[in-house]
Amino acid sequence: MLLLACVVAVLHGAAVLFMLAGGLLALRRPGLVRLHAPLALVILALNLAHADCPVTTLELALRAWAGAPAYSGGFIGHYLLAPVGLDVHSPAVQLGLYTAALMPNAVAYGVLGIRAVRRRLSPAAR
């Protein structure tokens, strides 16, 4: 079960990375928007609601089933911030996390929007 918990943690990390960089990836592959936008909105909603992530809950349940110790602070707090001595609940860290998550995606979706408008206004598209 501990191996399965590790697999869940790796997939969770991949989902977080995709949430962070998915907008930029969509600049190259616009079809990724269909996957990225809902995932990013769900992750954002969970964070803004201070709700427990269901993937973290699954990982912790698998760890408990395997007899491994649980952790607190959530996935990002445990795997990314705690090792470098940052508190996930600190306002400065929260601002940094939201900035790191929102800025690249806002820029990417802005560029995608501009591209879509240009395509619609282009005489070659008619």
Image (cartoon, rainbow, N blue to C red):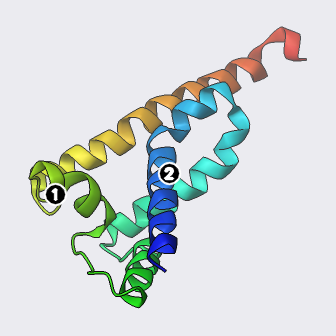
Residue drawn where x is 22% and y is 75% of the image: 72
Q: Quadrant of the C terminus?
A: top right
Q: Tell me the residue at 51%/54% (across/down).
A: 15
Q: 115 left or right of 74?
A: right
**Residue 117, picture quadrant:** top right
Residue of label 1: 82
Residue visible at 84% across and 10% down in the picture: 123
Q: Is residue 122 above or below residue 98?
A: above
Question: Closer to the N terminus: mark 2 or mark 1?
Answer: 2
- 121 lies above or below 102: above
The residue nearer to you, when weighing 52 against 112, is 52
Residue 78: image quadrant is bottom left
Q: Which residue is mark 2?
A: 14
CA distance separating discs 2 and 1 = 19 Å
Residue at left offset 13%, top offset 48%:
84
Whether residue 18 is visible: yes
